[in-house]
Each structure stands twice: as C-alpha cells, then as structure tokens.
Image (spheres, coloured by chain):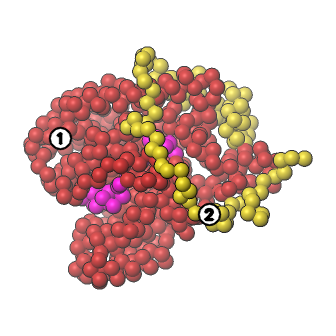
Amino acid sequence: MHDKTMTELAAGLAARTFSSRELTRHYLERIARHNPSLNAFITVAAESALAAAAQADQALAAGTGGPLTGIPIAHKDIFCTAGLRTSCGSRMLDTFIAPYDATVVERLAAAGAVVLGKTNMDEFAMGSSNETSWYGPVKNPWDQTRVPGGSSGGSAAAVAARLCAAATGTDTGGSIRQPAALCGITGIKPTYGRCSRWGMIAFASSLDQAGPMARTASDAALLLQAMAGFDPRDSTSMDTPVPDYVAGLDADLTGLRIGLPKEYFGAGLDERIGAGIQAALREYERLGATVVEISLPNSALSVPVYYVVAPAECSSNLARFDGVRYGHRCEDPKDLEDLYKRSRAEGFGAEVQRRIMIGTYVLSAGYYDAYYLKAQKGRHLIADDFRRAFGQVDVIMGPTSPTTAFPIGAKMDDPVAMYLNDIYTIAANLAGLPGISIPVAPVDGMPVGLQIIGNYFDEGRLLNVAHRLQRETEWHLGVPQAFE
Amino acid sequence: MALDRSDVEKIAHLARLAVSPAACDRYALDLTNILDLVARMDAVDTTGVEPMAHPLHMTQRLRPDRPTEPDQRERFQAIAPQTEAGLYLVPKVIE
C-alpha cells in the first residue's frame, strides 16, 4: 500500500479495497521497522492515529469522505498539536504539550487526514542538515551516511522512505525545498501569508511559511488545497481566494515563458546538477515552453541579508523561552537572571544560541542602521529583481541546492559553509514568493531538485508546471532501495 | 568585524544566555565569520532604497476591540514549571 500516491490511496479507500485502519497500521509497522535507523520521527502517535483512522472509516462508509479522509500523514514537530508533544527539535520543549492545534493541523484534521506522528527537524528550524536537532540527526534514506537536508529533514526522509503518505513542512530559507531536493520528493513553499502561521512555532516571522511535502505535485496540490486560506488568528494571513489546485494540474504549457537566472548557474554549482536541470528544461521545451536567460543581479545579496533578518527576528521570537511559563527550567536558580540565563543556555543548542546572539548584536544600539536597516533595503532590491523578472517570464527555474546530500558531520564545524547550502532558496523567502522543488535526474544515485519559483499567489501554476513534467518523466518515481 | 571574548560576554548577557568562558572563544570565532559573510551586503549601494519590512507591503490588519480568547489559565499553567494559586513562580526578586 505504501507504494501508492495519495490519489491512489484515496481511490483504494473509496472503493473499500482497504480501510484507513489497515492503511494506518501498515504505515505504523513501517515506522516501527525503519525509524530506529532513520530517526525521521520524534514522536509516533499510534493510538490517536488508529482512533482517527476508525473515524475516517466511518466517514468513508457513510459516503461523507473527501480526498484526504483516512490518509496517514505526519506533521513537522514545529506545528502545535493539542495533547501530543511539540518539541520543535529542542531540549527547551522536550516536555511541551501545546494546549491547542495549529491552524494547519486543524484544517488537515477537518479534511480527515490521519496523523501518524511528529517528524524530526533542525532545532527551531535553524539548520540545513537536520543535525542541530536535540533528538539527533535524521539519515537520508538514499544513503544513511548522508544528511536529508533541513530543516524539514524528518518530513522529507519519512516521505521518501514511505513511512507516511505525505507530510507538512515549514520553509524560512529553504527548509521545505532543500530537504525535498536532497531526498527526491516534491515540496512547495507557498507565498508568504498563503498558509496560516498560527500555532506554528515562530523562527523568523516575516519569512516563515508552511507547505506540503509529498511524492508528487498532484499529492502536494491535494494537501495545499486543505492547508491554504485566510485565518483571522494570523495577522499576516492573506485574505486571497484559494484556487482549485487539482483542477489546474493538467493545464497546457504551450507558450509558458521560463526564465533561467544566469546567477544560479555560476561557480559553486555541481555541473552534473546543472546538466540535470538542462535535461528537464529540454522536456519543458518539448511541452511547448520557451526558455530565456534572465538576470537577478542582486542574488549575491540574499545570504548576507538573510543572516541579518532571520537571526534578528529569531532573537526576538525566542525571547519568550524564559523558563517561567513553559519549557525547560534550570535546577535551583539563585535569582531571576540566573533562571533566565541557565534555562536558555541549557535548553537551546549551539546553532540556536549563535543565531540568537547574531540577532541580538545586529539589533543592539548603534548597530541597527548598519545591519538591520541595511538588510531591509537589500531585501527590497532582491524583491525588485523578481518583480522585473516576472514582467518577462511566467516562472523562474534553477537548481534547488548547489550539491547533493553531503555526509553527516561534514559541515557542522563551519556555520558559514552550512548557510551556503541555501544560496538558491533564500531569495524566494526574502521576496515572499512561492517556490517548489521536484526531482530531476539523480547524480551518483543521490536525488537532485529542480526549483521553480513563481509570482505571488501563483502556486497553482507551480503545481501545474511540476505535474506536467511528472506526467512525462519518471524522475519522481525513484524509491530508495531499502524502502521499496 | 572581529568580535572578541568580551563582546560575546556582553551579547550573551543581553540575550540572557549563560555562556561558559570556553564557549565564548568558540562563539567569538563563529560570530566573526558570520558577520564577515553579512558584510558582503556592504558592496551594494542602497542609497535611497526603502527598507522592506513585509514581503507584500501589507499593513497590520485591525479587528474590533473585543475579547476573543476565553479564560484558559488552568490549561496554560498546567505546562508551567512552577505555579501557585494561579500565579507563575520565580526566584525571589525583592529582598
């Protein structure tokens, strides 16, 4: 059953070929067998999953089910789930049980999806390899000596290894797209404001966005349909209608204008990855698209600007973890300052502390103009580059990541080298644009992602463009050997 | 911009993080490397460019000034490290 896409699973459930309880039990068995080595899940919720599956079976029998009813999925452990631990990959929240569900969790539950558990992630979503998790690194199902990418590495590995039909992720600087690329799955970061951030633990509030991680673009469309939409509880949620993503999947691509930013194909890109992107572009030309070279002249600004804006917002957001109201508290504090300082130093790992300190520094008196204000201006230039580009083209394509998955431990001692993994993904977050990563030809047996960036609220087109390639090619059908 | 141990001690205090002296040296190196990366943005002239705070230039939405949250004090305090009589407890702050 785990070899089926969500669309196929929904058909099987509707035809009563198998029940949601059987399907859920099957995935739970796979998790029990494979999670000890992969470490993709932090928490498995067998009991509540089976209860939700029983409910889904009743809805299916009554004929009131929808396309997600009874489908077993997983949530990144950054989404609050009432009654089920939400750790955010941190010792700080090791025992935290949220009193409410995130909007995204609530919406998927209302659509009938069954939650198998919570997936591993870089601590507070800060990382590109899933190695900063308090619960240990996740292994890449394609080669267990390598990282799955991050920060949504647990979700990516779980989907790639067929431990769930699909999963949720979040993307602040590439955290859905980069692990999707490194694990050979499809992941979409929607426009900023498309999915509610309510109940999604905040890292950098002007960049964070939730999205689906799935086997195919059509599965991602089904999930995004349920996740997207206005939420009055999130003050940055956009009140823009959600189109029918599934209905638009097969639209013809004749006349589609694809822009290739020359800055995304320069030094630093593994040329075998570049060749894989070119092969995909030839498929698009066959489908009637035209490819033109464009320029995003301020691309080199993205990583520097991001490492001011994201840490600044992180230092402010993570100030709430004070050892007083919830989360880790140190033993025997001698006074209030000691309580704050030791609770935070014990609760947060090194990468989170680095980012809090960078953020504190760039926001401190005397440095604000030189760093934060300068970065916000740079951010404007980056967004303007895209605005000009979308006057010429419909979508922008390029690599998702400059390399395939690297060995566990390879970049942990060099934060700057780690940050450069997100060189192609960060700009879309700074501009607030949607982006999707889909598999193209692998290199040495390791997955490679094609990134497609779209204009604001053009998720439907991204899913359509991705789906049409998946109809014509088999790159997205690869399964890591041990998990067939 | 090179940071030294005393810079890190000051930043760690502002951020309310207890950082050991040994870790301060390591962080000084890491933070210096990150600030060197950040300094690359100085190569671009941003004179006259408006700072961008929100990707879609949206302004804060307002809602009617009416309470929307029910009282959930007991649920919220159930996950607190230490409470008493509906209050959060911290070490004594007034002698």
Residue B11 pos. (x, y %): 67, 33
Q: Position of residue A136 (x, y in %)?
A: 54, 55
Residue A211: image x %, image y %? 37, 53
Q: CB under 8 Å between callouts 1 and 2? A: no
Q: Which chain is yellow?
A: B
Residue closest to the eye, B85 or A15: B85
- Where's the N terminus of chain B, which quadrant? top right
Q: Where does the magenta region start and end?
A: A203-229
Could you tell whether A400 is left or right of A363 in the image? left
Residue A84 versus residue A302 in the image, above or below: below
Chain identifier, red in the render: A
Which residue does the image show at 58% across and 63% down from the upper left?
B70
Instruction: Reply yes or no: does residue A223 show up in magenta.
Output: yes
Residue at 14% from the left image edge and 40% from the top image edge: A256
Residue A233 appears in the picture as rendered: yes
At 48% across and 49% down in the image, what residue appears?
Answer: B63
- Please give the residue where the numbered disc 1 appears in the rendered image: A281
Q: Position of residue A86 (x, y in %)?
A: 54, 61
Depth check: give the residue in front, A65 or A312: A65
Task: For mark 1, name the chain.
Answer: A
* Residue type pointed to by label 1: Leu
